[in-house]
Amino acid sequence: MVPSPTASPRRLRPVRHAAAALTLVAGAVAMSALPACAAAGADYGTPTIELSAAYLSGAVGATGDPTVTVKVGQSGADAGALTVSATATTHGSVAGTGDVTVTGTGATREVAVRARGKGYTDLTLEVHGLGGETATTTLHYAASGAVQNAADTRYLTGSSDSSAAVDVGGGYLVVADDESNVLRLYRRDASGAPVRTWDVGSGLDVDKEIDIEAAARVGDTIYWTGSLGNNKDGEPKEDRFTLFTTTVSGSGADTELEVGGSYQGLRDDLVAWDKANGDRLGFAEGTADGQVPKQIDGFNVEGLEFAPGSGSTAYIGFRAPLVPPADGGAALLVPVTNIDRLARSVGSEDTHATFGDPITLDLGGLSVRDIRRNDKGQYLIVAGSWAAEDNSAPYALYSWDGVAGHQPVKRLDLPTADPGGWESVVDVPDLSAPGAQAQVITDSGSADLYGDGTEAKDLEHEEWRKSRSVRFSLNS
C-alpha cells in the first residue's frame, strides 16, 4: 500500500447539543399563585409542553444523572403560573411518578428521574394551565443497574463504544468511538450528552469506520489512529489503517477541532519492518487475510502515547499480539520515531514510518488497552485481555516510567463485575501526590445495560447508549 497524505486542513463544523442538561437538580416546583390578570372568565388557550429530548437514561444509585429540559406555555397566561408534574408510569419498578422531580420557574423547567430498578418505562408529564386546561407528553426512560464506585461514576451518553479520550482543558474531554468516525466533547465531571460533535469521516475522505482506538496529544495537535487490524471477520479494510491528526483551538466548552493530515501506510510499514527483522513479532501472519485481530497472535492497536520528552517519537500499544503469543506473554509497544512527519497535510509519497526497538512490558499476562503520559514523564497503562470484549477478564492500572527495560508497577485492579470493558484513561495525575486519581472510561458497546438482551451499540435511541467514566484513587 502506498502511503498517501491528505489535502490541506479542513475545518470541522461543531454541532451544539441542547438535548440533555448535565447537572442534577433537586427540589420541587412550588404551586404558583394565579397572576392578577387571571380574572374570572379569562380566555386561556391549550397549554403546550415540549421536551428537549424524548429519551433519557439513568442508573440505579447514580449521582448526578442527566436531566431533560421541558418548555411550557399557554396563551393568555404567564408561564410562571403553570405547573408540571409526572402523572403516570408504565413500569413503576423502574421509576414511579414520585421519582420524578421538576424544578425551575417560567417557561423552562428541568426534569430529573431517580431510578428504582433496571429496565424501561414511559413517564407521562403533564402541564397544568389556567382555566383547567392541561397537556401531556411522554418521556421514554431507561435505567441501567447499580454499579460499584457509584459516587465517582458519571455516564457519557450518546455513544456506548468509547475507545479513546483526550483532555482538552477547562474540565472537558474529547472522546472517540470505535463504531463511528465521530469525536464527542463532554464535561469531565458530569453525566450527559456531548456538548459538541465532529464527524471526521468526510474531512478524511473515508467511507467506512476508522475503528479509532487510540489517541495522544502533543501541544495543540491530537494524533488518532485506527486499530490497524483486520475487521472481526478477518477482512482487511483500508479505512481502519488510518492515522490522522486534529488541531485543537480553544478549551473547555469552546473547544474547536480541525482535521490536519492523515496517513494510511503505518500498518504496511510495521509489517515490512518486522519482516526485515526476521518476523520476530509475527505481524505478517497477524495481518493476513482471514486472521481476526483479537487473538493472542493477532494484530490490533489500542494505545498511543509519546515517548518521554518527545514530540516525534510515539509508542504504539498493542492489544495483540502478546510476546511470545502465549499465556503469560508480555505486552508490546513499538516506538514510531517520525510520527510527526506521517500525518502532515502536505508530504512526500516516499514518506514511511521508522521504528525503534520494540519494548515488552510485564503486565501479568495482559495487554495494552490504553497508555497515557503526564508532563512529569509518568505513564499509566490500562491493561486488559487481548480477548475480552467487556468485563469477562481481569483489568488493571499500571504505572511506568517510560524507559525501555524498566518494568511497570501495578497500581490497582479495576472492578470487573459491572458492564463494560475498561478502555481509556483520560490523563495522568502526579502519581506521587497523595489523593491522586485517574479517570478511566469503559467501552460498553457489547454490554446489556437494561436487561433486555440488547447490546448497547444496537440500542435504537442514542440517548440510551452510554459509557461509564469512573475516577479511581491511585494512592491509598
Image (spheres, rainbow, N blue to C red):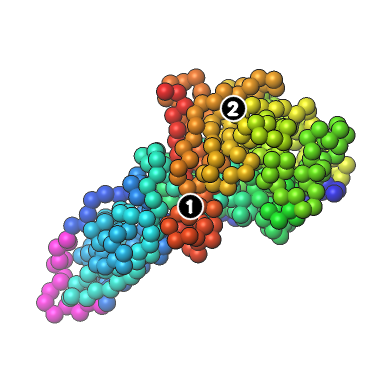
Which kind of residue does numbered mark 1 sit on? Lys
**Extreme residue toward the left, this view:** 40
Q: Does the magenta segment cover residue 35?
A: yes
Q: Which residues are magenta?
A: 31-45
Residue sitting at 72 percent across and 27 percent down?
Answer: 359
On the rendered structure, is 463 left or right of 137?
A: right
Residue sitting at 63 percent across and 22 percent down?
Answer: 407
Residue annotated with mark 1: 466
Residue 365 picture quarter: top right
Residue sitting at 35 percent across and 50 percent down?
Answer: 60
Residue 449 vertical placement versus 326 (above, below): below
Q: Pick the residue in front: 41 or 117.
A: 117
Q: Pick the residue in front: 421 or 55.
A: 421
Residue annotated with mark 2: 379
Q: Pick the residue in front: 117 or 253.
A: 117
The image's mark for residue 408 is none
Q: Secondary structure at mark 2?
A: strand
Image location (x, y in percent) of residue 410: 54, 26
On the rendered structure, is 169 left or right of 240?
A: left
Which kind of residue does numbered mark 2 sit on? Tyr
Image location (x, y in percent) of residue 456: 51, 56
Q: Earlier in the sequence, mark 2 or mark 1?
A: 2
Image location (x, y in percent) of residue 224: 66, 43
